Amino acid sequence: MDAAGLAEELREVGLAAGLAAVGTTRATSWSRARSVLEDGRSAGRHGGMAFTYRKPARSTEPQRVLRNAATLVVGAWPYAGAPPEAPAGSGRVNARVARYAAEDSYGMLREALGAIADCLRGHGHRAVVLADDNAVMDREAAWRAGIGFTGKNANLLLAGHGSWFVLGSVVTDAALPALQPPVANQCGTCRRCIDGCPTDAIVAPGVVDARRCLSWLLQRPGSFPVEFREALGDRIYGCDDCQEVCPPARREERRSPRGSDGNWVDALELLALDDDALLERCARWYIPQRDPAVLRRNLLVVIGNAGDPADPAVTDALRPYLDGPDELLAEHADWAAGRLEQRRRAEEDVVA
């Protein structure tokens, strides 16, 4: 089979495995992407995030993944779907989970990319699957492979479909032609994502300051910044706001089935679990050093924002932490108690 025929076969295999789009790009050095990462790190916009920021020279050099790599076959796995209504019931505090994390999106992406890798190996080529891996800058690979364009929210948008996708690649020594050219930016004058960010984290078109991004702050160790705690609202993992206001993403949402029950978790239930059980329940989430205190910190902030101030179960959940030995959790529990009291008084003023 010639190279063009193999590239088309790989596309068909990927689409049959559930990918929404498949593209190819040469495994060359990405100097533009490296400069973007290095500039962001120098300006402090990485906010302590490692991932591709840790070693820009590595994450923009696909040939470091596989000796004599020639091509990246890039795939996009869809996960769109508006969350169902939050469960009702007393003694419960609903906490939102970002849509990509409501199901094992990266696990399904790996399986689909694995089908492409198996096809390549069947033709005598080497292949390495990369998904949610800091070895390669996924968004840059996807843009170069013609899958989509980088929107003003810094996510990759598939033309007409928005950004409800997770991205991954298969690095291979097979020399394959491009299936399609890179896509030009199609945002035009729209700036809904910039205006819709609850913390003004999108500081310029396509530029996100991680120090203000709720998705990253929920994963970062240490104290959750006081100035962003109220803006966190009921989010426990991730933030979809800049995608939810994006016009093509909204159209894609209407075309997709509803999300799963995994879009909501009970903050009180999670907080009551012991450390091992808590980590097991949230096993798919990125948690620095697998430290359950990071999750408990987030849960306490959510309870302060979304708990019913009149519900004894809510105030009871804070007590073990208010005077507990962990200073980080005691500080966040104290903030949550103050926030609940603030909300209780505001509700009384409205009634009066």
Image: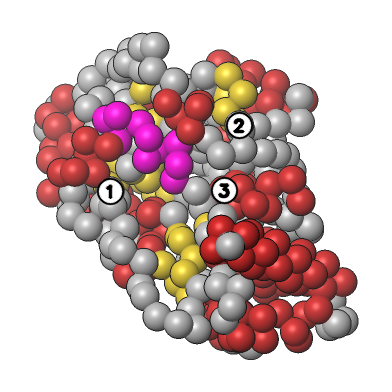
- What's under tag 1, amino acid-wise? Ala
Please say whether residue 133 is one of the residues in the magenta stretch: no
Q: Which residue has dot 2 on it?
A: 200
The residue at the point 19 percent across, 31 percent down is: 7
Instruction: Specify the quadrant of the image occupied by residue 32.
Output: top right
Q: Position of residue 309 (x, y in %)?
A: 61, 73
Q: Are marks 3 and 2 in contact (CB under 8 Å)?
A: no
Q: Which residue has dot 1 on it?
A: 80
Sequence-wise, the earlier of marks 1 and 3 is 1
Residue 215's tag is: 3
From which residue to which does the magenta span run?
240-249
Nearest the eye: 140 or 130: 140
Task: Nearest to the eye among marks 2 and 1: give it.
Answer: 2
The residue at the point 79 percent across, 70 percent down is: 334
Q: Main secondary structure of the magenta part?
A: helix
Nearest the eye: 20 or 212: 212
Q: Alpha-carbon neighbours of circle 2 within 10 Å: few (<14), some, or many (≥20)?
A: some
- What's under tag 2, amino acid-wise? Asp
The residue at the point 81 percent across, 78 percent down is: 322
**Spatial separation of the CA atoms under disc 2 and disc 1:** 24 Å
- What's under tag 3, amino acid-wise? Ser
